[in-house]
Image: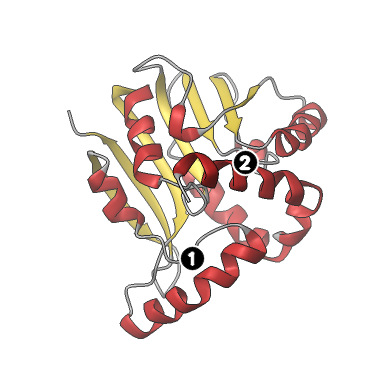
């Protein structure tokens, strides 16, 4: 399957899951909210891009004042995000867009944010390169991600379970996101483990040049 086909399948999957997406992640979200807060405490600047904004789970943590743009591949997810923004009284530009082909000029944003996104991007390296393209030279890229465990036996288990998880939920549990960042030409500023197994990480990166 090529990237175009994989992207279309991903979009269709999240369009289908949109009505139940928040319910599916409700238990995990109780913990994830703490991690989201940690990420948004790192955010500064006047122009912010959130990629893979989904149904708007990060919206309660948006800072007041900056210009915020949020994108998602799925229009049905964005419909729910628009309703959430209205309930919260937020001014945010919401656009349907593929992170692998961002429709923004180079060096457009002070900060680019993504939470639990690159587990489902068909070509994560391409998507990360796009983040590096649209962020300003002194800007930051902040990611909250789950990755393949470094523990050998647990990593192999995640590899075995991954096809089933992708079919059921649409995301991968064995992505090597830190390696993808390096391949995309981004420079790591920090990596913080958020759980004992090192699966969930808060990552700061920036363009290498």
Neighbour class for label 2 at 10 Å: few (<14), some, many (≥20)?
Answer: some
Above/below status of 147 relative to 83: below
Nearer-the-camera pick, 96 or 10: 10
Residue 164 shown left or right of residue 155 in the figure: right
Image-quadrant location for residue 195? bottom left
Residue 17 rendering spot, x and y as whole percentages: 74, 51
Residue 144 shown left or right of residue 189 in the figure: right
Query: What's the mark number on residue 173?
Result: 1
Neighbour class for label 1 at 10 Å: few (<14), some, many (≥20)?
Answer: many
Name the image colouring.
Answer: secondary structure
- The residue indicated by pointer 2 is 58
Nearer-the-camera pick, 26 or 124: 124
Residue 56 rendering spot, x and y as whole percentages: 68, 39
Residue 78 rendering spot, x and y as whole percentages: 71, 33
Q: Earlier in the sequence, mark 2 or mark 1?
A: 2
Identified at 44% across, 34% down, the residue is 100
Placement of the C terminus among the 4 image quadrants:
top left
> What separation in Å lies between label 2 and label 1 (alpha carbons)?
21 Å
Above/below status of 60 relative to 202: above
- Residue extending furthest left? 209
Nearer-the-camera pick, 59 or 79: 79
- Residue extending furthest bottom? 153
Query: What's the mark number on residue 30?
Result: none
Identified at 49% across, 48% down, the residue is 38
Residue 80 rendering spot, x and y as whole percentages: 78, 37
Identified at 32% across, 73% down, the residue is 150
């Amino acid at each position: 399957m090529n990237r175009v086909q994989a992207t279309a399948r991903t979009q269709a999957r999240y369009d289908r899951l949109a009505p139940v997406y928040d319910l599916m992640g409700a238990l995990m979200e109780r913990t994830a909210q703490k991690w989201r807060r940690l990420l948004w405490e790192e955010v500064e600047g006047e122009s912010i891009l959130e990629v893979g904004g989904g149904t708007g789970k990060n919206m309660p943590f948006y800072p007041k004042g900056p210009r915020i743009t949020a994108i998602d591949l799925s229009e049905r997810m964005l419909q729910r995000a628009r309703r959430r923004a209205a309930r919260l009284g937020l001014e945010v530009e919401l656009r349907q867009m593929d992170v692998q082909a961002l429709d923004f000029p180079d060096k457009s944003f002070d900060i680019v944010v993504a939470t639990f996104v690159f587990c489902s991007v068909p070509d994560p390296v391409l998507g990360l390169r796009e983040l590096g393209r649209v962020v300003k030279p002194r800007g930051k890229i902040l990611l909250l991600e789950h990755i393949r465990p470094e523990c050998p036996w647990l990593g192999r288990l995640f590899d075995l379970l991954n096809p089933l998880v992708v079919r059921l939920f649409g995301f991968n549990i064995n992505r090597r996101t830190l390696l993808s960042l390096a391949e995309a030409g981004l420079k790591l500023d920090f990596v913080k483990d958020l759980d004992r197994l090192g699966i969930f990480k808060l990552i700061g990166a920036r363009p290498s040049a």
